[in-house]
Image: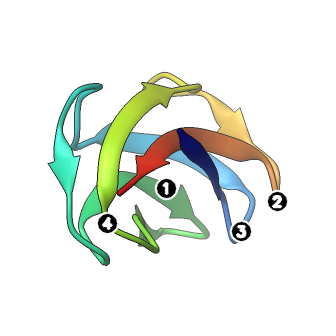
Amino acid sequence: MAVLDIKAETPGTVWEIVARPGDDLAAGDEILVIESMKMEIPVGASKPGRLIDILVAQGDDVAEGQTVARIDVL
């Protein structure tokens, strides 16, 4: 199993969680949305795989570079 950490590219607040653990994702599929400075910033899979875990909850504050999800890369 090759695990890929998905990181927040900007600080903000988790606005919405789109995907669920166990979901199969293609590269670019949205996992969650971060609200930062009144902008919605999607966080997606950079490679295809299966979503293992989401490490944040809706409403959580996240820092730039923080791991927010993990994918088992196909």
What's the distance in space between the residues labelled 1 and 3, CA to CA?
Answer: 8 Å
Residue 12 in picture, x, y percent from top left: 66, 54
Give the image location of residue 65, x and y in percent: 82, 59
Q: Residue at x 35, y 38 (%)?
A: 51
Classify mark 1: helix, strand or loop. strand
Q: Amino acid at mark 1?
A: Ile
Quote the CA–CA distance across marks 3 and 2: 7 Å
Q: Residue 65, which numbered label?
A: 2
Q: Which residue position is annotated with label 1?
A: 34
Picture disc at residue 10: 3
Q: Are marks 1 and 3 in contact (CB under 8 Å)?
A: yes
**N-terminal of the two: label 3 or label 4?**
3
Specify the quadrant of the image occupied by residue 29: bottom left
Other residues around mark 3 within 10 Å, as few (<14) / some (14–19) / many (≥20): some
Which residue is denoted by mark 4 in the rendering? 48
Separation (CA) of disc 4 from disc 1:
21 Å
How many C-alpha atoms fall within 10 Å of the one at disc 1: few (<14), some, or many (≥20)? many
Q: Secondary structure at mark 2?
A: loop
Residue at (53, 38) in percent of width and height: 1
Q: In this image, 60 relative to 62: left or right?
A: left
- The 10 Å Cα crowd at callout 2, few under 14, some 14 to 19, many 20 or more, is few
Q: Nearer the viewer, residue 32 or 21?
A: 21
Front tag of 4 and 1? 4
